[in-house]
Image (spheres, rainbow, N blue to C red):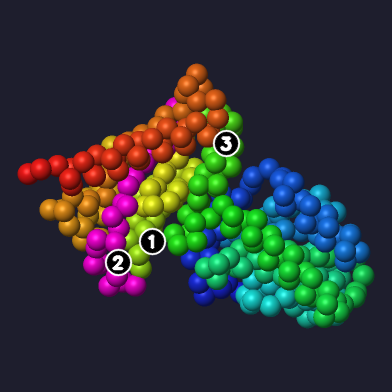
Amino acid sequence: MQAPQIPVDEPDRLATLHSLNLLDTPPEARFDRYTRLSARVFDVPIALITLVDRYRQWFKSRHGLDVSETPREHSFCGHAILGDELFEIRNARRDPRFRDNPLVVGKPHIRFYAGAPLICPNGQRLGTLCIIDRVHRHLYPDEREVLTDLADIIVGEITGYIDTETGLTNRNGLRSLGAKVVSAGWMNGPPRLLLFDISHHKHNMAARQQNQSGLQLFAQMLQQRFPSAEIIAHIGSGNFCVMLKDNEGLDEQSAVRQLCTEATKLLQYDVAADVLPVFVGRVVYDPDKHASIDEIIREADSLFYQRAQQRLYNLSAPA
């Protein structure tokens, strides 16, 4: 058996994958319909949406398969994410890379495999939409095109929750994923949103010198400072949210203070012009006050608006 190679950009690929907050989430109808459709269109017993994690391939949606994940070293999809084109194995028993693979000699007894990579707008390959049969076969050119088109549609479903510039969750993603965090319960304090405003990110030189926007650099800093965050989101116009839950070991005040200090230095903000990165505030979930995640986000928007109005007042006030 030949284990799949590791992509040269694996750290960036995993960072993109993990930022989506899809791993180990419950089944969703918006994905299940594509595996169900793929099985019917291609007349195969198994269709999967796979996400290739560090040591495993995990199935976000599965049709015709009982297990939720398999080791990455055994995966066909680990090979498929090494390129942008559809990866097809017509007869695994005759392919030296796979003929003694546990998934070939044992359940689910793979003979035919075709996987279309799920390629994000930033070029990272998250996993595949794949179809599997227990008899050898091949795809015709038009079938290959259909499978690739379906994979692109699935990427659209995934990235509909992603801010394309920063790679973070966007407002829609915060609403959907945040609802799951709130409903999941907690042990050591309710979920809360930390709010940051760098809406004047264009007023820095360091980002331009590094060929990155201030948004991209600040997004990376948030990910480094809050590695255990449930969600890190850019909801537009330089407004960022960090959703935390059950973080007993985190000194929030210290983390926020250090983050703003580091951002001021790294992004070379103009202190005199009052365009510093700002910690706007915190919204703590209160079931008596917030009937849904939408009301939490609405309160966050209100705080961002107040901050913007305060800045405008300071700029227009007479000396």
> In the rendered image, which residue does mark 2 sit on?
207
Question: What is the three-letter code of the residue carrying label 1?
Answer: Gln
Q: Above or below — where is 312 with respect to 156? A: above
**Do residues under tags 3 and 2 come within 8 Å of each other at their CB atoms?**
no
Q: Residue placed at 92% from the left, 70% from the top?
A: 135
- Residue at 61% of width from left, 63% of height from top? 126
In the image shown, does 312 or 21 lie closer to the viewer?
Answer: 312
Q: Mark 3 vs mark 1: which is more N-terminal?
A: 3
Q: Is residue 259 above or below residue 310?
A: below
Question: Looking at the rendering, which quadrant does residue 184 occupy?
Answer: top right
Numbered mark located on residue 236 in the image: none
**Element under label 3?**
helix
Q: Quadrant of the N terminus?
A: bottom right
At horizontal 26% and vertical 50% (from top left) the residue drawn is: 277
Q: Is residue 205 magenta?
A: yes
Label 1 crowding class (10 Å Cα cut-off): few <14, some 14-19, many 20+? some
Which class describes the residues within 10 Å of circle 2: few (<14), some (14-19), or many (20+)?
many
Disc with the residue nearer the chain's start (2 vs 1): 2
Residues at marks 3 and 2, CA–CA distance in whole angstroms: 33 Å
Q: Which mark is residue 179?
A: 3
What span is colored magenta in the figure? 188-211
Q: CA distance from mark 2 to mark 1?
A: 8 Å
Q: Is residue 220 left or right of residue 296?
A: left
Q: Is residue 262 left or right of residue 272?
A: right
Mark with earlier residue (3, 2): 3
